[in-house]
Image: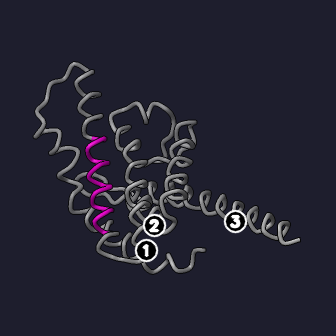
Amino acid sequence: MDEKITEKKSRKLKVIDIVYIGISAALIAVCSWISIPLTVPISLQTMGICLVAGIFGMKKGTAATLVYILLGAIGVPVFSGFTGGMSIILGSTGGYIIGFIFTALIVGFVSDKYKGKMIPLVLSMVAGILVCYAFGTAWFALVYAKGGNSVTLSAILGWCVIPFLLPDAVKIALAALLTNRLRRFVK
């Protein structure tokens, strides 16, 4: 009898995990659609990924990020600017999309290990965004050079990283605060 109850609870947890992952992927998509028009448009994608990984941890946060990316890859317009498809992933910003996976892994791992501790959470979000920058900037340089263009690393950093440093710092602060407030409501 106890075995059946345990099995039922186990199945129920799996269902709730799937629900959390689906809702989280949808949240990341909504965050990607929100764009703040500055000199360079700023979306809230990275904030959504940091928030989801911070709240749900490494497994569910990374799974939600993968679902989000797979939806975009098959053409569902979940990426920034209501875009989707492999052309976006293979285009100049595709490295950032791949970098989202590593951001979720880093933030989720630290969130699982240091539950509720603000400084490790913020540092993990900074590290995750820096890894995302590294993937995205390297990919951008490859795609840009493939087009027969030549450009310096400082120019690429000026296009792909520097304009986003301050907005990403604000997004990290918001994601960390929201994570600490919302995490206690998640089982």
- Say which residue label 3 marks: 13
| x, y percent for residue 112 | 45, 66
- The residue at the point 50 percent across, 75 percent down is 183
Q: Which residues are magenta?
A: 122-136
Report the magenta stretch's main SS.
helix
Of all residues, the one furthest to the top in this rendering is: 148
Residues under labels 1 and 2: Cα distance? 6 Å
Q: Amino acid at mark 2?
A: Asp
Mark 3, other Cα within 10 Å: few <14 / some 14–19 / many ≥20: few
Question: In the image, which disc is placed on residue 112?
Answer: 2
Q: Are marks 1 and 2 in contact (CB under 8 Å)?
A: yes
Q: Viewed as shown, does residue 76 lie left or right of 129?
A: right
Q: Quadrant of residue 92?
A: top left
Question: In the image, which disc is placed on residue 115?
Answer: 1
Q: Secondary structure at mark 3?
A: helix
- Number of residue marks: 3
